[in-house]
Structure formats: C-alpha cells, structure tokens
Image (spheres, rainbow, N blue to C red):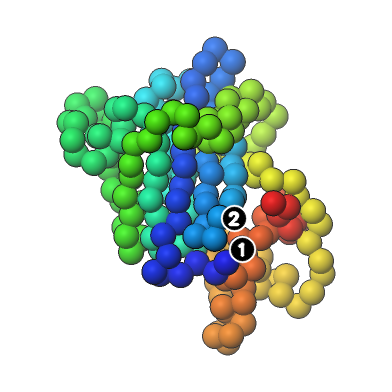
Amino acid sequence: MAQPDEEEVWRVFVDGASSLAGCGVGVVIVSPTGEKIKLAVRIDSRVTNNEAEYEAVLAGIRAAQEVGVSRIILYSDSQLITPQINGVYEAKDDRMLKYLQLIKTKTKTFVDWGIEQIPREENGEADALAKLAAFLSEVSTREVLYVSHLILSTAEEALPAPEDSCMTSLIKFITAGELPEDKVQAQKIKRQAPRFVLLNNVLYRRSF
C-alpha cells in the first residue's frame, strides 16, 4: 500500500448494524490509489442503531490513525449522526453528546478530516462487514466507550509474515508507534506497516 502522504486524502466508509443477533460495525479504508483495508468490528454489548453508527465512526477514526494517515473523509449513510457531527442537527441525548465529544477529541490528531452522508447503496461493503461482525461471537474485547466494547478483527486473509530485520521495528511501530531514528528506515517502516497485522503477538502479512 502506498505510503500515507499529508497531501493525500484517504476515504473511510463506515456503517453500523444492530439486531437481535448482535451488534457490529464495518470499516473500509480506501487509499488514494484504490487499495483497501477492511475491518469487521463486533460490539460486545447491546446498542441502538444510532449508537452503532457512532461506534462505526469511532472505529473508522481509530483505524485511520493506526494506518498513519493525516487527511481523511469519512462516509456514512446515517441520516442522523452525520448531520449531528457536522453541526446541522443538535444532539440532546447524553450518550450522543458523549460520542460527539469523543469524536472531537480523537480527530485532533488529523491535519484535516470531514464526514459526508452517502446513499446506502454506495456503502455496501461497510454494511456487509457490519452485518458480518454482528454475528461474530468468540473474540476478545477491549473497552472503547462506556456504552460498549469493540472487537477489532481484520477482514483480510492473513498470511505469515517473512522473517527479516524489519520485523522488530514493524512490531514496535504497530504496537507503540515507535520508529527507528534512521529517517530512511523510518519511512520504510511507515510504508510497510499497513500491509501487516499483529495477532496474538505474531506478525502476519495482509492479503488484499
């Protein structure tokens, strides 16, 4: 995947699903060159449809931060939360206000960001991932917001990563954001990091 660049805008499609079977969100990150990272995220507690949509936005923000991009546009088909985030609609519910505050805090790391509402038919991939995540059951949890717990799992097939001198640096960057002091090596690690995922302390190469 191409190295994130400050002048490049990455697109992040998000969607939430809430049903009797479970709740989940889907995230599709699209690079400026068209490459994709897909995430299925299960919400480990019962949330409303609107809360699931907010969780999807938060998952998209976190995923973009982990990739290391600085400019993003989020796309959601929600007719409520997108106008609320953009300030067109006023949020009065306490939970919605907490989500808005958390989004405001998390997006400070971006050079530029925005969110746009799109038709549901243009958000099919994120919708499918959200519904898939709602049916996941045996996964580990991590607390994200007081109303829910999210489980992050890559939707790409993972292949064992080759052993080489960059693996230790990759793991440090993925887990702690640490980069080598050498600028050339640091740039190489930033380019390579989106191609890998760390599962149970084992580094795997993503398959697109």
Q: Residues within 10 Å of mark 2 (few under 14, many from 20)?
A: few
Given residues 115 and 150, the one toward you in this image is: 115
- What mark, if any, has residue 54 been given in the picture? none
User: In the shown orientation, is residue 56 left or right of residue 132?
Assistant: left
- Could you tell me if the residues under marks 2 and 1 are in contact, i.e. CB atoms within 8 Å? yes
- What mark, if any, has residue 35 been given in the picture? 2
Percent position (x, y) of residue 60?
46, 45
- Report the amino acid beneath label 2: Glu
Above or below, comparing residue 44 to residue 40 in the picture? above
Above or below, comparing residue 140 to residue 63 in the picture? above
Say which label, 2 or 1, has the lower sequence index: 1
| Residue positioned 57% across, 79% down in the render | 186
Q: Residues within 10 Å of mark 1 (few under 14, many from 20)?
A: some
Residue 100 appears in the picture as rendered: yes
Percent position (x, y) of residue 132?
62, 28
- What mark, if any, has residue 1 been given in the picture? 1
